[in-house]
Image: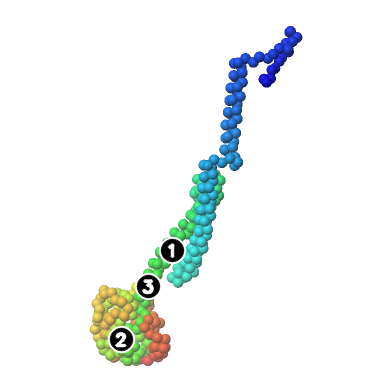
Amino acid sequence: MKKVKYYFDSENLAYRKIVTKKRKRFGYIALFLLSTAVFGILSFIVLLNTPFFETPKDRLQAREIENLKIRYAILNTKMSEIEDVLENIEDRDNNLYRTYFNTSVIPDEQRKAGFGGVNRYKDLEGFNNSELVINTSKRVDVLSKQAAIQSRSLDEIVKLAKAKEKLLAAIPAIQPVKNENLRQMASGFGYRSDPFTKVRKFHAGMDFSAKTGTPIYATGDGVVDRADSNASGYGNHIVIRHGFGYETLYAHLSKYNIKKGQKVKRGDLIGFVGSTGRSEAPHLHYEVHKNGEVVNPLNYYYGNISAAEFAVISKLASQENQSLD
């Protein structure tokens, strides 16, 4: 039953029935519907922005975010493994390779330095997971820089290794005359009696006594600088420039097996024993020069003689006998 409303008419002292006009009634209904609609829309918006109500799109985005977090965690784990491997390589680089090749190490401050100046990660700020993304990006950048530095370092080590290989090949490391062809070690490096004047003077090389025509071999890789008889006292002689400050001289030859400007390898046949020039008997006078100074050839015979043979030749070379030139 519809509820009837009354109002008191003070002029007529009576209660009268309230009659609502149709127009006004429709206005109330429209206002009610509008307010209801506005309230509903506002409530829906509020629900969309609360964790209590998720759309399928929200759930998909949430799963993607969690998946990205997992991927970032895996990436950071792998980067930790890479950092350990790279640290091991850097340690060997500094303490093994660079020590062996006698070159300065790369300090950790240079290897692991960050990037100063402009903020490289400004575009990654202001998001819910900015800290995770920025820290990961920094680790990737530092690792990339470390890898680039290590790559350049290894390139340098390769160059040093190639230079070392050339150096080892250039060092005059063998006897110029084979042991089976030697008659005796006639004279060593140092002060000896001159065979012609009998005066004690400095002997700048070693004399290997052998038959005329005995083969003579290059003691290291190099280029023939001289093959002539224009130097006083040496007769037919050969000078080989090995590089790295090394030079060898082979004197009193009977004949040559090479010519000036020719490249030779250690062990190549370069000439034959003779007694040309200022010589008392067939032999090879052999000298080693390092940075322009004569040095004892005995210190370089490590390429083709045993320890026992070295001991014997060392003992013979140390005797202050008479030289053959």
Q: Quadrant of the C terminus?
A: bottom left
Vertical comparison of 234 with 62: above or below:
below
Image point (75%, 9%), residue name: 13
User: For the residue marked with disc 3, what is the amino acid?
Assistant: Glu
Image point (43%, 62%), residue name: 151
In primary-sequence order, the first of circles 2 and 3 is 3
Which residue is disc 2 drawn over?
Answer: 284
Q: Residue 191's x, y, as percent?
A: 39, 87
Residue 295 appears in which quarter of the rendering? bottom left
User: For the residue marked with disc 1, what is the amino acid?
Assistant: Ser
Q: CA distance from mark 3 to mark 1?
A: 18 Å
Q: CA distance from mark 1 to mark 2?
A: 46 Å
Is 178 situated left or right of 4 in this image?
A: left
Q: Quadrant of the N terminus?
A: top right
Specify few, some or many for label 1: CA neighbours under 10 Å numbering under 14, 14-19, or 20 or more: some
Q: Residue 93's x, y, as percent?
A: 47, 67
User: For the residue marked with disc 2, what is the amino acid?
Assistant: Leu
Image point (34%, 91%), residue name: 184
Q: Are marks 3 and 1 in contact (CB under 8 Å)?
A: no
Label 1: which secondary element: helix
Which residue is disc 1 drawn over?
Answer: 153
Is 124 situated left or right of 10 in this image?
A: left
Is 141 situated left or right of 259 in this image?
A: right
In primary-sequence order, the first of circles 3 and 1 is 1
